[in-house]
Image (cartoon, rainbow, N blue to C red):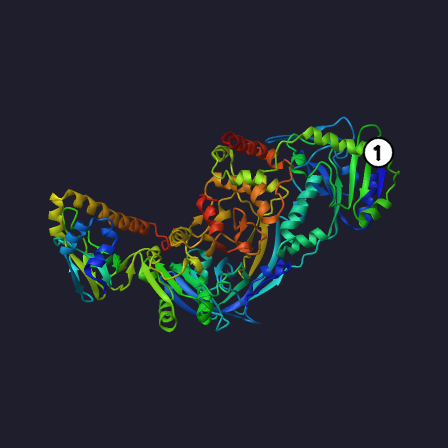
């Protein structure tokens, strides 16, 4: 298993940060794990944490009254889970559940957020990187609006 | 084998063909047009008639001589005989919960095509390549083709829409015929005849004739030379394949689309257009299906229909398909050009779209870019 | 082995449907069924991987349907059909014992034999899996002749995945890197959610020595090919299956043209570099 510092340093979402910035972020990080089926966050919860998934898969669901919840996305090992910690109103938007055993690095988003308020360079750097994560998810989601498998007949 | 024939010898040709119990299809005037129909006598040829053609316009006018073949081409082509408009291929019957399919073995009597223009000989060669020169040969076409006897007639009177010279298919035919005639109206009205096959030579030997002198051969050459000069070159085919493929989104297609009615006349009149559809037609009892092969046209909406809709919904796309296929991608598919320069698509287009003009318009902007 | 004709053949034979009886039928999704067919008389035709047959429903018409059979082991014709029009609806309504007409096989084959020694990447979208099944079975039967084998399968929802039990059995019984995703799932769906393109970056293959086989609607092929090329797989190593309306199936009627090619005669299997520019022109 890699050390926490190594995982953080190698993750694309922290690429290009200064050593000082990386050390600060590492100071806000710890290893966590979730059991299969464990709820990581619910819609409306304060988004004070985000995660780098090392092993396992996490599902994002939307509850639909009187029906089964819809699974709108999954986040896999190697990806970032959570950006609402950086974007107001700092709330989780989905039901977030571990679909299998998950090992992740958890980050104290509230703490990093506070630091960004005064350290605007760090704030800008993180916003630049997380906005790319968001854009990637948005584009991937929009492509699913096209129905590329032709499942819907005309 | 060569000879000179007097105009009266044409009746001898018809007699000789009918003696063999062959059908004779030849040009004749009907409904103010020169069409190809079965004839019983050479008097049914369009004696003293010529055609005046322009984009979207066709009319017949009297000549001041008795030329037998003094016109260019009519609305039909020999495609109607060889790639018949509608043919039953197979009959499928329901039987005891099963299916029984019987192939149709239609036999066509030997048929003489009397009066095939060089552009038409070229068109037949092209259809031969498409329909019997590939991995699968259309058996109905093959049977009719093998039953055909071609008497070609070189051109002396190109119409305004003719551009066989531009396409390298005329006005003089080099091969692909059993017998070829060149009509000379200047001086003594006569025909120079030349056999292209043994069967053609056999027929020629039966006709009243004179030997062909040098003067006759020169006169015949002059006829086709004059025709070639009269047409000039109105479509540059040397680079048309790449030109069209490099300009698939050219704004000219929007311009054509605003005029084109997608009426399919061009594909009906065109001697090389070969698209057919295979439809199964139920009879009223519901116990038998006739599998029919019928003419089809890429200009119809149904032509490209698949589940999920057609792939060429816009008229623009369908015109582009026809133009690029005819002059460009046909070459990739069959190693020949698809157009013989007969001009029918120009004459019979109700809005007078001229394929030569469209290509030139695309080329003009192309050249302006470079 | 697949039947190929090296000389010119008469068309009438090829235009005449041969009676085949439905011997098995299975519903795959709400609008897709798989039929197994055996000839009423004589030996069955043996289509190659990637080839298609024209299937005929008496009194209704004909459609081209890809061969989906595993003829490494048995000789029944297998066709997976989506009921979207009159003919496909009639075929899907056939019962065991119903006789339909079959003509074929037509078209070219996946170069799966030529891919020996290489890594293989199969990317299927929705009911794009059945046309790849014959090629997949060839690889599985000759597994040691190939390198890594990544099978990437995507569909709109979990109910649109076909042959799922069989696909999962491949993962258990053979050395296959299987990855499945759906556009949108529900809480019963235990797998990935996302477009099938999501499965390409982590897929295990050596771009210098691999061939990809992709089947799905043109838009899917476009995005998948792009993602494969982002992994440095050359366009000439990406094989796709094109679809166009067909009538004769033997290169005589002209209907299946796209640009310079006749799909029934030159395809349906093409390399991506052959078709990329054709797909890029709207309504070509």
Q: Is residue B14 left or right of residue C259?
A: right
Neighbour tally class for label 1: few under 14, some 14-19, many 20 plus, Cα within 10 Å: some
| Res B163 quadrant in image | top right
Q: Quadrant of the N terminus of chain C?
A: bottom right
Numbered disc total: 1
Q: Position of residue A98 (x, y in %)?
A: 21, 63
Q: Secondary structure at mark 1?
A: helix
Q: Position of residue B326 (x, y in %)?
A: 58, 42
User: Can residue B365 be seen in this snapshot?
Assistant: yes
Q: Is residue C28 left or right of residue B48?
A: left
| Res C157 quadrant in image | bottom left
Determine the residue positioned at 66% across, 42% down. Answer: B77
| Res A60 quadrant in image | bottom left
Residue on which the image places disc 1: B216
Q: Nearer the viewer, residue C163 or C11?
A: C163
Determine the residue positioned at 49% across, 52% down. Answer: C245
Q: Furthest-front residue in view?
A: A19
Q: Is residue C19 left or right of residue A133?
A: right
Determine the residue positioned at 52% across, 55% down. Answer: C267
Chain to which the residue tagged by mark 1 belongs: B
Q: Is residue C44 left or right of residue B229?
A: left
- Is the residue B84 above or below the residue B213 in the image? below
- Is the residue C76 above or below the residue B14 in the image? below
- Is the residue C77 above or below the residue B191 in the image? below
User: Can residue C239 be seen in this snapshot?
Assistant: no
Q: Position of residue B231 (x, y in %)?
A: 67, 30
Q: Position of residue B312 (x, y in %)?
A: 47, 44
């Amino acid at each position: 298993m890699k050390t926490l510092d190594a995982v953080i340093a190698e993750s694309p979402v922290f690429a290009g940060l200064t050593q000082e910035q990386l050390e600060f972020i590492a100071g806000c990080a710890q290893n966590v794990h979730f059991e299969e089926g464990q709820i990581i966050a619910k819609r409306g919860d304060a988004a004070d944490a985000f995660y780098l998934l090392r092993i396992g898969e996490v599902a994002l669901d939307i509850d639909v009254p009187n029906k089964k919840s819809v699974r709108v996305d999954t986040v896999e090992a190697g990806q970032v889970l959570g950006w609402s910690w950086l974007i107001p109103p700092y709330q989780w938007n989905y039901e977030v559940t571990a679909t299998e055993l998950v090992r992740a690095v958890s980050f104290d988003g509230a703490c990093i957020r506070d630091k960004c308020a005064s350290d605007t360079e760090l704030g800008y750097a993180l916003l630049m990187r997380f906005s790319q994560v968001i854009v990637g998810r948005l584009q991937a989601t929009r492509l699913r609006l096209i129905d590329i498998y032709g499942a819907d007949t005309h | 084998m060569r000879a000179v024939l007097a105009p009266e010898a044409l009746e001898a040709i018809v007699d000789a063909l009918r003696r063999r119990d062959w059908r004779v299809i030849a040009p004749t005037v009907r409904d103010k047009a020169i069409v190809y129909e079965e004839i019983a006598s050479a008097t049914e040829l369009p004696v003293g008639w010529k055609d005046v053609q322009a984009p979207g316009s066709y009319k017949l006018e009297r000549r001041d001589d008795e030329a037998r073949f003094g016109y260019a081409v009519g609305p039909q082509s020999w495609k109607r005989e060889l790639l018949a408009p509608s043919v039953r291929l197979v009959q499928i019957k329901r039987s005891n919960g099963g299916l029984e399919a019987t192939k149709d073995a239609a036999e066509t009597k030997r048929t003489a095509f009397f009066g095939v223009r060089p552009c038409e000989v070229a068109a037949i060669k092209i259809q031969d390549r498409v329909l019997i020169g590939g991995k699968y040969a259309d058996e109905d076409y093959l049977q009719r083709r093998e039953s055909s006897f071609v008497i070609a007639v070189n051109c002396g009177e190109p119409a305004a829409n003719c551009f066989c010279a531009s396409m390298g298919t005329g006005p003089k035919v080099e091969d692909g015929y059993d017998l070829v005639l060149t009509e000379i109206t200047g001086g003594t009205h006569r025909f120079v005849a030349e056999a292209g096959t043994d069967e053609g030579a056999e027929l020629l030997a039966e006709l009243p004739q004179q030997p062909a002198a040098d003067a006759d051969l020169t006169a015949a050459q002059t006829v086709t030379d004059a025709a070639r000069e009269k047409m000039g070159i109105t479509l540059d085919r040397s680079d048309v394949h790449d030109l069209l493929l490099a300009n698939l989104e050219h704004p000219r297609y929007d311009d054509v689309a605003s005029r084109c009615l997608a009426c399919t006349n061009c594909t009906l009149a065109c001697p090389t257009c070969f698209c057919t559809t295979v439809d199964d037609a139920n009879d009223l009892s519901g116990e038998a299906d006739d599998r029919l092969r019928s003419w089809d046209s890429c200009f119809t909406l149904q032509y490209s229909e698949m589940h999920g809709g057609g792939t060429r919904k816009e008229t623009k796309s369908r015109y582009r398909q026809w133009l690029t296929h005819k002059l460009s991608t046909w070459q990739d598919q069959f190693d020949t050009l698809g157009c013989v320069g007969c001009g029918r698509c120009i004459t019979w287009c109700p809005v007078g779209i001229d394929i030569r003009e469209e290509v030139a318009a695309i080329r003009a902007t192309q050249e302006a870019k470079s | 082995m697949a039947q190929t004709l090296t000389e010119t053949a008469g068309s009438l034979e090829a235009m005449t449907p041969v009676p085949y009886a439905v011997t098995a039928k299975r519903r795959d999704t709400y609008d897709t069924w798989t039929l197994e067919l055996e000839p009423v008389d004589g030996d069955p035709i043996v289509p190659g991987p990637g080839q298609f047959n024209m299937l005929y429903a008496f009194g209704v018409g004909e459609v081209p349907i890809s061969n989906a059979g595993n003829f490494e082991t048995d000789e029944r014709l297998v066709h997976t059909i989506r009921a979207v029009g009159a003919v496909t609806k009639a075929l899907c309504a056939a019962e065991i014992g119903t006789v339909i007409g079959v003509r074929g096989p037509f078209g070219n084959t996946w170069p799966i034999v030529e891919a020996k020694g290489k890594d293989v990447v199969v990317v299927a979208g929705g009911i794009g899996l059945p046309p790849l099944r014959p090629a997949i079975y060839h690889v599985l039967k000759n597994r040691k002749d190939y390198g890594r084998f990544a099978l990437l399968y995507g569909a709109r929802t979990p109910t649109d995945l076909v042959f799922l039990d069989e696909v999962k059995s491949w993962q258990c019984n053979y050395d296959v890197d299987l990855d499945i995703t759906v556009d949108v799932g529900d809480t019963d769906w235990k797998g990935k959610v996302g477009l099938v393109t999501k499965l390409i970056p982590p897929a295990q293959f050596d771009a210098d020595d691999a061939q990809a086989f992709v089947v799905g609607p043109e838009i899917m092929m476009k995005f998948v090919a792009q993602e494969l090329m982002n992994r440095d797989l050359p366009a000439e190593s990406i094989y796709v299956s094109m679809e166009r309306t067909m009538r004769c199936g033997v290169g005589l009627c002209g209907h299946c043209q796209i640009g310079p090619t006749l799909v029934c005669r030159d395809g349906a299997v093409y390399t991506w570099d052959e078709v990329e520019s054709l797909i890029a022109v709207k309504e070509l």
